[in-house]
Image (spheres, rainbow, N blue to C red):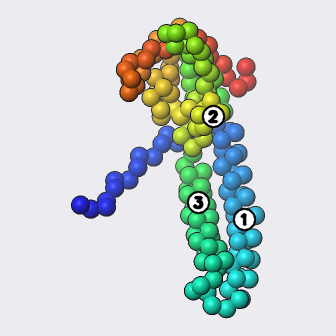
Amino acid sequence: MSRYRPPREQGSPYITPEGEAALRAELHALWKVERPEVTKAVSAAAANGDRSENGDYIYGKKRLREIDSRVRFLRKRLESLQVIAAPLGDRNKVWFGAWVRVENEAGDTQEWRIVGPDEFDLTAAKISCDSPLGRGLLGKEIDAEIELETPSGVTRLTLVSIRYAAD
């Protein structure tokens, strides 16, 4: 049995202006703040002598590799992203960046914002446009019925409202 894993599908290349700002802030913090601090710590640890048993040196080098890997990823990803600041069409339909309110069969409502795969955060009510719910909502109008396949069966949702950041 081999350890080969096919490459993971890359998500949609869309991002909100807020998401782009967050990624750029992370890149700046890693490259301009954290990396110089870790580099100083590694230099100080290397000056202590034996590096093979120096935990500060070993951990610092590992952390530098992690930072460099994340910086490479962020730079490449930011180059390929397309910032979407306004709805792509009719404001009465769900598009990227919309805040949507959905109601289930029991009458419970939830509000979600449709964002790119690099910025989704369920605790902040942000879902990816690539998720099953996100794909099901895109292009729909108010009062549209959405059916989702879930492990517990089919879930039916009704689109109650749509708004955009400028509203």
List x then y, in percent, for residue 2: 27, 62
Q: Which mark is residue 34?
A: 1
Q: Residue at x 62, y 68 (%)?
A: 63
Foreground tag (1 vs 2): 2
Mark 2 burial class by Cα count in 10 Å: few <14, some 14-19, many 20+: few
Mark 1 surroundings within 10 Å by alpha-carbon count, few (fewer than 14), some (14 through 19), many (20 or more): some
What residue would you read off at disc 3? 70
The mark that comes first in sequence, 3 or 1, is 1
Q: Residue furthest left?
A: 1
For the question of whether residue 142 can be seen, the reply is no
Disc 2 residue type?
Answer: Thr
Mark 2 / mark 3, whichever is N-terminal = 3
At x 38%, y 27%, the residue is 151
Task: Name the amino acid, label 3.
Answer: Arg
Q: Which residue is mark 2?
A: 123
Relative depth, front residue between 167 and 132? 132
**Could you tell me which residue is drawn at 66 percent across and 49 percent down?**
23
Tell me the CA gap for discs 2 and 3: 23 Å
Judge from the rendering whether residue 123 lies leftward or rightward of residue 4; answer left or right. Answer: right
Local crowd at mark 3 within 10 Å, few (<14), some, or many (≥20)? some
Residue 111 is tagged as none
| Quarter assignment of residue 107 | top right
Q: In the image, is residue 150 above or below residue 83?
A: above
**99 lies above or below 122:** above
